[in-house]
Image (cartoon, grey):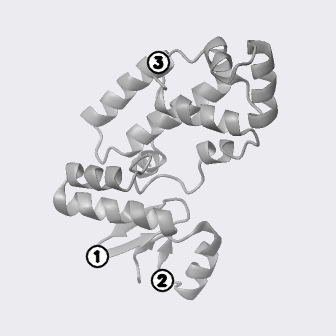
């Protein structure tokens, strides 16, 4: 691992750096490849790494087919951060609100106004807003916007090269959020420095 960029679970990055001082430990990504060295940040990140290896060897459709067979929610790119805001919002105590969040992720292109979301839970818009604020520390509009921005970030990060895929993600972001957002990948920003 000398001189190679490697990753491990965030909890063990410091230990890895101490035990392998010539390795370049990167604490952010869920997996990475540096030459012939492949590393991942944990068990599920290892699944993502395996899918990336399948994609590298057999193409995107093969990897997508396997991900569907495994009933995976999404195929995550290696540059994705180990910490997810979406995951932190799944920690809400209300089961019905967690189920609504999953539905929201599957329907981000729809008009997700407070009235529609409240109706799905059988609540008044005012009561739903109070529940959402208590459980997520955001009002419903802020929460919907956060999910949409993260989905756009996912599209940008999953594009291995700039150009058309990134521009398509930006157009989709405008459609989803109805704002002219500029979403840039941390890894692209870092490589531009």
The Cα atoms of the two marked residues, 1 and 2, are separated by: 16 Å
Looking at the image, residue 126 sits to the left or right of residue 22; the answer is right
In the picture, which quadrant includes the N terminus? bottom left
Task: Determine whether 137 is above or below 174 in the image.
Answer: below
Q: Which mark is residue 161?
A: none
Looking at the image, residue 140 sits to the left or right of residue 13; the answer is right
Q: Residue at x 73, y 42 (%)?
A: 92
For marks 1 and 2, the one nearer the N-term is 2
Task: Determine whether 166 is above or below 178 in the image.
Answer: below
Task: Determine whether 73 is above or below 58 in the image.
Answer: above
The Cα atoms of the two marked residues, 3 and 2, are separated by: 43 Å
Expressed as whole percent of the image width and height from the top left, the position of residue 39 reads 42, 72
Q: Which mark is residue 180?
A: 3
What element does badge 3 sit on? loop
Expressed as whole percent of the image width and height from the top left, the position of residue 103 reads 54, 31
Look at the image and tell me whether residue 130 can be seen.
yes
Camera-nearest residue between 159 and 104: 104
Instruction: Residue under label 2, please give it.
Output: 22
For marks 3 and 1, the one nearer the N-term is 1
Q: Which mark is residue 36?
A: 1
What element does badge 1 sit on? loop
Which residue occupies the extreme bottom position in the image? 19
For marks 3 and 2, give the one nearer the viewer. 3
Decide: marks 1, 2 in contact (CB < 8 A)?
no
Camera-nearest residue between 165 and 56: 56
Expressed as whole percent of the image width and height from the top left, the position of residue 152 reads 45, 33
For marks 3 and 2, the one nearer the N-term is 2
Q: Residue at x 52, y 14 (%)?
A: 111
Number of numbered discs present? 3
Camera-nearest residue between 106 and 154: 106
Look at the image and tell me whether residue 183 can be seen.
no
């Amino acid at each position: 691992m000398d001189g190679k960029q490697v990753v491990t679970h965030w909890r063990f990055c410091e230990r890895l750096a101490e035990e392998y001082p010539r390795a370049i430990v990167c604490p952010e990504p869920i997996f990475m490849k540096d030459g012939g060295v492949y590393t991942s940040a944990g068990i599920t990140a290892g699944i993502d790494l395996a899918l990336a290896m399948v994609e590298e060897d057999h193409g995107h459709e093969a990897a997508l087919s396997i991900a569907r067979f495994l009933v995976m929610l999404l195929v995550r790119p290696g540059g994705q951060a180990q910490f997810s805001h979406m995951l932190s919002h799944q920690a809400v105590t209300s089961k019905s609100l967690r189920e609504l969040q999953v539905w929201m992720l599957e329907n981000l292109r729809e008009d997700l106004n407070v009235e529609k979301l409240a109706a799905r839970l059988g609540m008044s818009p005012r009561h739903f807003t109070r529940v959402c604020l208590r459980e997520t520390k955001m009002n419903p509009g802020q929460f919907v916007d956060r999910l949409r921005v993260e989905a756009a970030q996912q599209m940008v990060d999953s594009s291995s090269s700039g150009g058309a895929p990134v521009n398509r993600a930006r157009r989709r972001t405008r459609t989803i959020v109805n704002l002219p957002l500029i979403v840039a990948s941390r890894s692209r920003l870092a490589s531009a420095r």
